[in-house]
């Protein structure tokens, strides 16, 4: 068995990367019984607070140590949670510092890939929550990943940023010989109340990216934000909310796509 590794990446902050990474990882383990590791590759450490009610006491080494050491192994730092089958790496404020040190290392792009070698044999799925830029850590995430999901808010600047990340995927393939498949572009925080702008932006997204745009959309839904504030999964907080249903549907679609793409 080899884990399928999915990176959630976008150049901007606040577009729903962490929300998507957390809800997908929870859905994979909760609804599909997948042994899942959620990697928090962002120094802001938002994954921990989002899942606070499920975290168990205990200390482990930070992810940055894994990335900087030749023998770093994510399997050793993964923490179990109260959600069966879900494991997370701890929040790590040292990641931004690690990013600066990585910049000076040969083969830095492969640090996470190496650190996941053993974890790949143990988990079914590994979800990587990338930081809000296209720096060294995101690069490590994409090089470690088999596939990538790009959340996009329906705003002109977010849509503009997609081409940058697609260009990075191309460069990774050309220069580093690693193919990270695009699972798709995920329209997030879709606001039905703002119908005219929403349809215009969706139309533009489809015109430019066509079948790369996923058929599942994540609506604006306060249950998603409120659940995070309480450190609960939206599937426990408000399982019938439109946000919970959309992420459950997304998880099904992503698993299906991973099966056909990989
Ligand atoms: P990123 O990881 O890209 O910086 P987050 O996932 O942390 O973005 O989302 C930023 C903020 O927006 C968070 O406070 C989150 O609760 C909120 N949020 C994300 N997605 C939604 C949504 N679909 N509906 C309402 N609020 C959302
Ligand atoms: Mg985030």
Image (cartoon, helix red, strand yellow):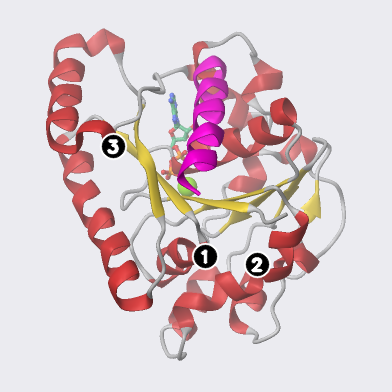
Nearer the camera: disc 3 or disc 2: 3
Mark toward the start of the polypeptide (1 vs 2): 2
Q: Is residue 19 above or below residue 93?
A: above
Secondary structure at numbered mark 2: loop
Residue 14 at least partly seen = no
**Residue segment shown in magenta:** 244-262
The disc label shown at residue 176, or none: none
The residue carrying mark 2 is 116
Q: Which numbered disc, 3 or 2, marks the residue that appears first in the sequence?
A: 2
User: Does residue 6 appear to the left or right of 157 in the view shown?
Assistant: right
**Horizontal and vertical percent position of residue 165:** 28, 55
Crowding around mark 3 (Cα neighbors within 10 Å: few <14, some 14 to 19, many 20+) is some
Q: Which mark is residue 212?
A: 3
Q: In terms of secondary structure, what is the magenta stretch mainly?
A: helix
Give percent across and percent down for residue 192.
29, 11
| Ligand 1 quarter of the rendering | top left
Location of residue 13 with respect to 31 vertically, above or below? below
Work out how far the residue at label 1 is from the one at label 3, CA to CA, in angstroms: 21 Å
Element marked by disc 3: helix
In the image, what residue occupies the spot 64% across and 13% down?
238
x, y percent for residue 259: 54, 40
Nearer the observer, 216 or 69: 216
């Amino acid at each position: 068995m080899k884990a399928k590794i999915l990176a959630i990446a976008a150049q901007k902050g606040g577009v729903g990367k962490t929300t998507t990474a957390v809800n997908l990882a929870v859905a994979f383990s909760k609804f599909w019984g997948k042994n899942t590791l959620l990697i928090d590759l962002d120094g802001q450490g938002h994954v921990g607070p989002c899942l606070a009610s499920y975290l168990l006491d205990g200390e482990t080494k930070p992810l940055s140590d894994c990335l900087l050491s030749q023998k770093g192994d994510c399997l050793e730092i993964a923490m179990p949670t109260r959600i069966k089958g879900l494991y997370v790496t701890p929040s790590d404020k040292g990641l931004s510092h690690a990013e600066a040190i990585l910049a000076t290392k040969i083969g830095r792009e492969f640090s996470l890939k190496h650190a996941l070698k053993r974890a790949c044999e143990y988990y079914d799925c590994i979800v990587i929550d990338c930081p809000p830029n296209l720096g060294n850590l995101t690069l490590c995430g994409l090089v470690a990943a088999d596939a990538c999901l790009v959340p996009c808010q329906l705003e002109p600047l977010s849509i503009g940023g997609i081409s940058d990340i697609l260009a990075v995927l191309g460069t990774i393939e050309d220069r580093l010989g690693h193919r990270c498949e695009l699972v798709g572009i995920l329209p997030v925080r879709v606001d039905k109340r703002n119908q005219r702008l929403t349809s215009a932006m969706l139309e533009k997204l489809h015109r430019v990216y066509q079948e790369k745009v996923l058929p599942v959309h994540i609506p604006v839904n306060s249950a998603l934000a409120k659940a995070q504030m309480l450190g609960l999964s939206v599937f426990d907080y408000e399982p019938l909310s439109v946000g919970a249903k959309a992420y459950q549907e997304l998880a099904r679609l992503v698993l299906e796509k991973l099966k056909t793409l990989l």
